[in-house]
Amino acid sequence: MAEQKTVDFVWNCANKLEAQSHVERLLKSHYITTCRKFARHNVQLPEDSFGAARICARCGNQWTDGNYQLHLQPQRLADTAKRKRLVAKLEMAKASQQKGLLSTGARNRAKWLRKHMASNI
């Protein structure tokens, strides 16, 4: 029961902050994270306040408090020997104009790998 009171107190403290400045947002995030840590094992948190639709699962910031933007990172693959050999085989087939050196699937995969491998950044 004491844990429930602590969780309620910390949650009320977090709700009183307006989150206008960066410091207030950090403090509010800290209070929400602390509240989630207290309630991890013994207290059931309400889904309408602590669900993924309301707060970020990673940092605990509420979605309504900030200006969030999504930045997509392009996919880059590490260079492995097998991938390098497949791309080299594609280049060799292109240079010699040989048909049948690579199957259609292997050729398409080699083109995709050449485009997405990290060395081509």
Image (cartoon, helix red, strand yellow):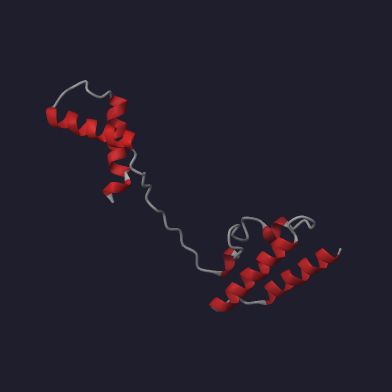
Residue at the spot x=73%, y=57% of the render? 40
Query: With 121 as the anchor, is 37 left or right in this view?
Result: right
Q: Position of residue 111 (x, y in %)?
A: 27, 36
Query: With 35 as the anchor, is 99 left or right in this view?
Result: left
Relative depth, front residue between 29 and 65: 29
Q: Is residue 20 above or below residue 72?
A: below
Among all residues in the image, which is located at the extreme left? 96
Q: How many numbered marks does the figure carry?
A: 0
Residue at the spot x=42%, y=58% of the render? 71
Among all residues in the image, which is located at the extreme right? 1
Q: Using the rendered view, name the quadrant where residue 7 is placed.
A: bottom right
Q: Using the rendered view, name the quadrant where residue 70 is placed.
A: bottom left
Query: With 19 as the anchor, is 49 left or right in this view?
Result: right
Among all residues in the image, which is located at the extreme top? 100
Q: Position of residue 116 (x, y in %)?
A: 32, 43
Residue at the spot x=33%, y=42% of the render? 79
Q: Position of residue 43 (x, y in %)?
A: 79, 58
Relative depth, front residue between 19 and 60: 60
Q: Using the rendered view, name the quadrant where residue 112 is placed.
A: top left
Residue at the spot x=79%, y=69% of the render? 6
Q: Is residue 36 above or below residue 103?
A: below
Query: With 21 as the anchor, is 75 left or right in this view?
Result: left
Quarter of the picture holding the N terminus: bottom right
